[in-house]
Image (tube, rainbow, N blue to C red):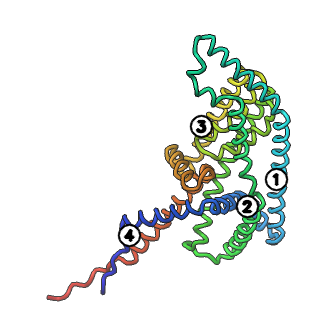
């Protein structure tokens, strides 16, 4: 019997394939990001759809109710954020006046200690006009991500339709254990666990942050709480982005003491949530170290752009699972193709 050698892939060929795939993802990142966000949202609300299907509801009814729920939530968030933005725009003259006062007080203090302003060019970056330009660009960058909401919603509906069909077939036992549908189901389950853990921990921190801001009397506490929840999906640097706006508002409204209280309070709340609660559950479920999370943030941010900061960990979890499946297939192929021992011939 002829011996069939085990399939092997040269390391250089594997690296070349990875480079080509990554380069392709980077080239189509604007379109790919919309699909990945829609896929992630579809996976996150898949339990609602599955619950309805398991109760015997028709696919059409389940899809309609799920889509309606997502649309209502999205429209509510859009309305709340739009109202908050209008209120912020209404208070821009007050904030600009306060920024000018603080800027002038800093200049006066610097001149009082004998430092010539002509020697400090960097302070021009802190002028009121520069700060408001940076702040407006920051907010526009955040809320522009919601500009494709309806397109993402439509794409998510098509993904949910496919999910519902896969769910019905899986209940009938039409998929084998090693089929791509079953394996995709395993990846989806991991993503659901990650999203649920991140969402619950982020919601805990957001509620605590809103309570702190309400107690201090900082304007737009609900909006800053929403941003805190949104940024909780960005590992490591999300907290820094979430604390900047409310701290600046507290500084402009009440001065340095309130600003420091906001910063210290956010640090205390998010330290407990991000470094005690969340890593504990993530470590138990996925065995992902903090270093891996940080590298994922950098890598996928480079490949996909800013949205890669949110998609980084889910993409890493999915890639890890796919590699596990590939190793399993190669091991199975190796066992199947292992050469049989030939009978010894009589001398």
Q: What is the C-alpha distance between the residues marked 2 and 1? A: 14 Å
Q: Residue furthest left?
A: 347
**Residue 310, x across and y down, in percent:** 63, 50
Q: Residues within 10 Å of mark 1 (few under 14, many from 20)?
A: few
Nearer the N terminus, badge 2 or badge 3? Answer: 2
Nearer the N terminus, badge 4 or badge 3? Answer: 4
Secondary structure of residue under mark 2:
helix
Q: Which residue bears the numbered disc 4?
A: 9
Q: Which residue bears the numbered disc 2?
A: 152
Q: Quadrant of the N terminus?
A: bottom left
Q: What is the C-alpha distance between the residues marked 1 and 4? A: 48 Å
Tell me the tag on residue 73: 1
Q: Residues within 10 Å of mark 2 (few under 14, many from 20)?
A: many
Residue at image point 61% right, 71% down: 181
Tell me the quarter of the picture where residue 111 sits: top right
**Residue 153, x across and y down, in percent:** 76, 61
Q: Nearer the viewer, mark 3 or mark 1?
A: 1
**Placement of 79 over or under 5, stated as above or below:** above
Secondary structure of residue under mark 3:
helix
Instruction: Please say whether residue 59 is visible from this viewpoint.
Output: yes
**Residue 110, x across and y down, in percent:** 62, 16
Residue at image point 70% right, 45% down: 230
Residue at image point 68% right, 51% down: 196
Nearer the N terminus, badge 3 or badge 1? Answer: 1
Secondary structure of residue under mark 1:
helix
Q: Quadrant of the C terminus?
A: bottom left
Q: Which residue bears the numbered disc 3?
A: 276
Residue at image point 48% right, 65% down: 20
């Amino acid at each position: 019997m002829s011996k069939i050698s085990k399939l092997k892939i040269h390391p250089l060929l594997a690296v070349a394939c990875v480079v080509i795939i990554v380069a392709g993802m980077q080239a189509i990142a604007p379109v790919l990001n919309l699909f990945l966000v829609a896929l992630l949202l579809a996976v996150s609300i898949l339990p609602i759809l599955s619950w309805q299907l398991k109760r015997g509801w028709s696919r059409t009814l389940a899809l309609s109710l799920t889509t309606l729920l997502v649309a209502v939530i999205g429209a509510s968030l859009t309305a709340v954020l739009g109202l908050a933005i209008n209120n912020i725009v209404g208070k821009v003259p007050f904030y600009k006046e306060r920024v000018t006062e603080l800027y002038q007080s800093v200049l006066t203090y610097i001149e009082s200690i004998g430092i010539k302003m002509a020697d400090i060019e960097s302070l021009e970056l802190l002028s009121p006009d520069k700060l408001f330009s940076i702040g407006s660009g920051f907010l526009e960058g955040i809320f522009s991500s919601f500009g494709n909401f309806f397109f993402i919603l439509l794409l998510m509906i098509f993904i949910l339709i496919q999910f519902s069909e896969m769910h019905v077939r899986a209940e009938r036992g039409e998929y084998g254990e090693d089929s791509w549908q079953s394996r995709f189901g395993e990846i989806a389950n991991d993503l659901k666990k990650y999203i649920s853990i991140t969402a619950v921990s982020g919601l805990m921190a957001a509620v605590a942050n809103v309570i702190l801001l309400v107690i201090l009397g900082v304007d737009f506490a609900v909006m800053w709480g929403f941003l805190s929840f949104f940024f909780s999906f960005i590992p490591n640097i999300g907290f820094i982005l979430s604390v900047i706006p409310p701290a600046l508002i507290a500084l402009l409204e009440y001065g340095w003491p309130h600003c420091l209280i906001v910063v210290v309070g956010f640090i205390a709340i998010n330290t407990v949530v991000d470094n005690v609660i969340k890593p504990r559950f993530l470590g138990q479920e996925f065995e992902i170290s903090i270093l891996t999370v940080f590298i994922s943030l950098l890598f996928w941010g480079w490949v996909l752009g800013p949205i890669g900061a949110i998609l980084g960990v889910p993409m890493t979890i999915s890639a890890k699972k796919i590699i596990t499946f590939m190793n399993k297939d190669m091991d199975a192929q190796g066992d199947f193709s292992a050469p049989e021992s030939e009978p010894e011939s009589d001398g």
